[in-house]
Amino acid sequence: MFGYYLDMALRSLKRNRMLTALMVLAIALGIGASMTTLTVLHVLSGDPMPGTSQTLFYPQLEPRDMDGYQPADDPPDQLSWIDGMNLLHAKRADHQALMTGGTVPVQPTQSSVDPFYSDARYTTADFFPMFKAPMRYGRAWSTTDDDSKARVAVISSKLNDKLFSGKDSTGQTLQLGDAAVRIVGVLDRWRPNPHFYDINISGSYSPTEDVFLPLSTARDLKLTISGMMNCWGGHNDNLEIAPCTWLQFWVQMDSPIKVAAYRDYLNHYSQDQKALGRFQRPVKVRLLDLMGWLDYQKVVPSDVRLQTWLAFGFLLVCLVNTVGLMLAKFMRRAGELGVRRALGASKRALFAQLLVESGVIGLSGGICGLLLAFLGLWLVRQRPSDYATLAHLDMSMLLTTFLLAVGASLVAGLLPAWRACQITPALQLKSN
Amino acid sequence: MEIRPIISSLSRHKITAWLLIIEIALTCAIICNAVFLISQRLERMNMVSGIAEHELVEIQLANLGVRPDGKARTRQDLAALRQIPGVSEASLVNQMPFSSSETNNTIKLDPAQKAPTLSAALYWGERLSPTFGTQLIAGRDLREDDYRDLDAVNKAAAGGDPNDKALPRVLIITQSVADRLWPGANPLGKQVYFGKTPVTVVGVVAHLVRPSSLSSGAEYSFLVPIRPVVGDGSSYLIRTAPQERQRVLKAALAALKANDPRRVVIEHRTWDDVRSEFFQNDRAMAGLLVGVCVALLVVTALGIVGLGSFWVAQRRRTIGVRRALGATRANILHYFQTENFLLATIGIVIGMALAYAINLFLMLHYELPRLPGIYFPVGAVLLWLIGQLAVLGPALRAAAVPPVVATRSV
């Protein structure tokens, strides 16, 4: 029976090519636009550490003086050196890493390559195991290296390709301006999105840094730091004692009990600091998990959300348009449907037949829409935004597109098909 | 034109008529808001910077390793840059309008005050205003004896003595800051406090936009007399005639390289590129919105054409009968035009309410201002026009139906 309905549907669609094309095009445009924007939104609001994100937490403290105090103030987004080091050395969590961004001058040994600046991350040993950063060669540095300000570095596979044409470079020397460090590890391809551990660095979706150095080493070498810095009280050039927040601190804990204990610890720590006179404001701590932190920081650009709303508005107009046209088309065939009813076809059969026809429109629209979505994503990738290169359709979005297309067209077909079935056969037969 | 027969005929196609009305309403609502968003983006992209945009080129350098002789190197670089033919001014500046990184400072009007009065961007560099090309509207420019060296300023600020001689004593503010701090009063000679350090306002410039936090006081900027040293994110800014920019840029790069080859060029571009890069996302968004508006209008227009054609085909016989009974072609044409006008009007009325609701939602979630009233009549006229244009084809076809159709059966 389905085959017969399909045949009838195709005949009917062929009879009115312009109209069929118009309906398919409207659905395709709507689906294409909404899938493009939805995919971008999906990519941007994804979990950068699937499976681990719920065990990663970002502690915040309130270390400022009373100058300009408002009770509703949120604690600063970052930590000062003193607090960061205190929390790091307390080792109250399973893993903890203190870090900041920076830029380093890289001088290749080959004279053919000009010196260049690379983004760097100055951090502590736990960074790699905590964030499950995959190593291609060698290993990460150890806590001992942190303590001894060891001249060691981990580099990205991209930099390894550029400087050492992809070969195992562990043990080699990396010249950073006046300083030389020994490469102990090379990362495998690794790009968490968003760049969650520091979202202040040139866009929240920037690629992973090329050079990783122990924080203590970077400070010792006086390497340039970059990122957000907020200061209060008096100015101080010495960042190790300055009242400035400029470090990100992440901890990992695998059970809710430990999380609660850590929160208590942060409260106690703040109270102690207040008793010492370092902290002046009322104690306020926060311990958001990774996704909570991204949400709090409003990482997904508001333009992207707006575009998604817009695209779905557009899809709605396209659907209403198609419903209207399909209804007009079905109603025009009232006579034919009346004859079929009079010859014994049940309402159900007519309904099924009309639904097949609208389904064909929807499916073709969906397939064209999918092609348009590929085109749309290609266009997005040509854009200069930091997230542009991430805009790819994955399996789950592909499935969503397909379901959206079929669902949309069935919804668009239901009303016209139902309405067309309501005709009275006798009336239709009589009028002609 | 009688409206009653049109309504009675439409009431026999209630669902289809309502669908068309909904489509027009949605289109109207989305387009009003989208056009408003476009205008907002264009306004942002055309924001006044207050500087001589078409006459500036930027070169940013970074040292390889620590330089003990930064001050001498900076002096030498600036001297070399100023000697390039065609260069009228050159300066080393800490930051520029429309760039992603920003140095701000909060100020108070009274050192005992609890909360700061405002936060403004700090611009510094030698011969800053003549290089930027800012327009001084009151007071004087910064003088040679006002200037302090950056490292000495940092040391003095860390020392904590608010009256240290190494701290800058004067500054220039924008008109926007003057209006905010002392509305209606003469700002010259007034004092602001950086922490506890008093600084006197000696000049006011008409405009100078801040680097990036444009939503919190776009023109809250100060010019302070501090000399930076090369590196640490500072940029050489060179002023020249617009047609000379590319040549000067090339010559400047060569001169800087000759002065010290152990440096990396991080950035070299004209200031037009700076603006264009800074607003690239706004431009892309505006382009996208224009695309969606056009697509929406096209889809809606095609929908009207499609439905119109159906109705004309369906009523062929009725039209024939009316023609046979004496209706003119113009009567038939006007019938369909009026019908469309009626549907469009209802759609537009609903669409306006919807547009207002969407605007409220956007105001709540995207910090957008209220939709100006002018959008409503303009949107209405646009949709009426689109509707009339779209229905013209089917209506003309209807008018062409000959009266003889009435006499034929089927």
Image (tube, rainbow, N blue to C red):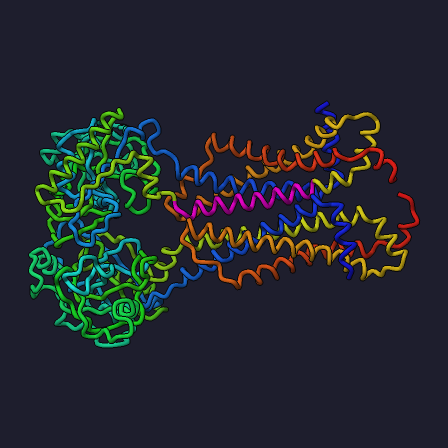
One can see residue A248 in this view: yes
Dividing the image into 4 quarters, which one contains the C terminus of chain B?
top right
The vertical placement of A95 against B377, above or below, is: above
Q: Quadrant of residue A323?
A: top right
One can see residue A107 in this view: no
The vertical placement of A185 against A211, above or below, is: above
- Residue plotted at (31% across, 72% down): B206
Indicate the position of residue A310 as horizontal and vertical percent values: 51, 47
Dividing the image into 4 quarters, which one contains the N terminus of chain B?
bottom right
Q: Is residue A243 magenta?
A: no
Q: Quadrant of residue B183?
A: bottom left
Q: Is residue B380 left or right of residue A202?
A: right
- Residue plotted at (51% across, 57% down): B35
The residue range painted magenta reads: A301-326
Q: Main secondary structure of the magenta part?
A: helix
The vertical placement of A196 against B302, above or below, is: above
Indicate the position of residue B240 as horizontal and vertical percent values: 30, 69
The residue lying toward the viewer, choosing from A366 and A418, is A418
- Residue plotted at (31% across, 28% down): A52
Indicate the position of residue A235 as horizontal and vertical percent values: 13, 54
